[in-house]
Amino acid sequence: MALTMTAAFNEFQRNIVNLDSSQTDRARASRDWLLGRMNTFPNNDVYFPIIYPDIHTGFGSFARRTKIRPLDDIDLMFGLDGDDCVYSESDGKIIITAHEGTVRLKYYKHDGTNFINSRKIINSFISSLNQIPQYDKADVKRNQEAATLKLKSYDWNFDIVPGNDSNLLIVFYVQIIPDDLVMQLHRF
């Protein structure tokens, strides 16, 4: 038992607030392994969007190292290539449009249009995650803008986001959007 206020605070922080370092190490290894498997999705599915691994990034409290107990989720942004699509703004919405040079994202259009449908992209992530044998008992589903992977073997789940609430694919933050918009979109 702590005898000073500082010792009591340190004990509280270590045992109640801060994540256990061995659990954090396992979570990082699990995240890195998952990213490695996800990087192979285009090899296993010729229609899967072209990936852009340089912009894969962790976000949320786990990535910022501000996560407190319990460790229940790990957020990932998975970068996708722009694939010769262009964006435009209309009525405050950003619309991503496929063109002739679009190789894979053309398979993810809203029916009867050339506009990219982010739900179809998320569903392709779910389908590919379901093909990983180690996750055959995992619960994989869409949760708004994310594909959510709830593992049976760990206490945490992964929220994998290929877009945001404006249905804008991550890659367009870097490759297409003007710099002033990039700063606005990176505030999570």
Image: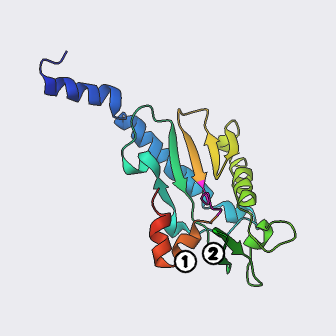
The magenta stretch is 161-167
Q: Of all residues shown, which one is farthest toward the right?
A: 112
Q: Which amino acid is tagged 1?
A: Gln
Task: Please tell me whether residue 176 belongs to the stretch shown in magenta.
Answer: no
Residue at position x 62%, y 66% from top? 169
Q: Which amino acid is tagged 2?
A: Gly
Q: Disc 1 on helix, strand or loop? A: helix
- The image shows a total of numbered marks equal to 2
Residue density around tag 2, few if under 14, some if 14–19, many if 20 or more, within 10 Å: many
Task: Please tell me whether residue 163 belongs to the stretch shown in magenta.
Answer: yes
Upstream in the sequence, badge 2 or badge 1? 2
- Image quarter for residue 139? top right
Residue 40, position as x, y percentages in the image: 64, 61
Q: Of all residues shown, which one is farthest toward the left?
A: 4
Q: Of all residues shown, which one is farthest toward the front?
A: 91
Vertical comparison of 89 with 111: above or below? below
39 sits left or right of 128 in the view: left
Residue at position x 59%, y 59% from top? 164
Vertical comparison of 160 with 8: above or below? below
Residue 17, position as x, y percentages in the image: 34, 31
Residue density around tag 1, few if under 14, some if 14–19, many if 20 or more, within 10 Å: few
- Say if mark 2 contacts mark 1, CB within 8 Å: yes
The quarter of the picture where the N terminus appears is top left
Residue at position x 68%, y 78% from top? 85
Mark number for residue 175?
1
Residue 186, position as x, y percentages in the image: 47, 63
Marks 2 and 1 sit apart, C-alpha to C-alpha, by: 7 Å
Q: Disc 2 on helix, strand or loop? A: loop
Q: Which residue is mark 2?
A: 82
Most frequent secondary structure within the magenta stretch = loop
